[in-house]
């Protein structure tokens, strides 16, 4: 469980999620979902992927806020540069 909590703050995990959703919402995957299927299948696919993206962003943001409020993390741990 501790590993799951730490992964929410890992910059590599965020990059992985970005690449995953970028690929899933790219042209080739959208055409696969649209091929020879009713139009509602494309709507369900886009709704599910977009909803999952929003939920994951919410979980990461809420966990990040709690992590910073508890004083356990600093900006270097989160992958941010302190010289901004």
Image (cartoon, rainbow, N blue to C red):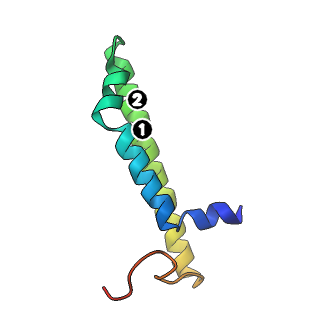
**Residue at x-position 37% and y-position 23%:** 33
User: In this view of the protein, which residue sits in the foreground, 81 or 58?
Assistant: 81
**Residue at x-position 42% and y-position 38%:** 49
Residue 50 rendering spot, x and y as whole percentages: 38, 41
Residue 59 rendering spot, x and y as whole percentages: 51, 58
| Vertical order, 41 against 76 (above or below) | above
| Location of residue 45 (image quadrant) | top left
Element class at badge 2: helix
Residue holding disc 1: 49
User: In this view of the protein, which residue sits in the foreground, 14 or 67?
Assistant: 14
User: In this view of the protein, which residue sits in the foreground, 35 or 67?
Assistant: 35
CA–CA distance in space, label 2 to label 1: 6 Å
Element class at badge 1: helix
| Quadrant of the drawing holding the N terminus | bottom right
* Numbered mark located on residue 45 in the image: 2
**Residue at x-position 57% and y-position 85%:** 71
Residue 24 rendering spot, x and y as whole percentages: 39, 38
Q: Residues within 10 Å of mark 2 (few under 14, many from 20)?
A: some
Residue 63 rendering spot, x and y as whole percentages: 54, 66
């Amino acid at each position: 469980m501790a590993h799951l909590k730490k992964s929410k703050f890992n910059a590599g995990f965020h990059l992985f999620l970005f690449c995953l959703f970028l690929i899933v919402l790219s042209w080739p995957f959208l055409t696969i979902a649209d091929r020879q299927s009713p139009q509602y299948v494309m709507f369900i696919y886009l709704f599910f992927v977009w909803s999952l993206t929003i939920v994951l962003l919410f979980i990461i943001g809420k966990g990040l806020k709690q992590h910073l409020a508890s004083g356990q993390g600093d900006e270097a741990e989160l992958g941010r540069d302190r010289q901004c």
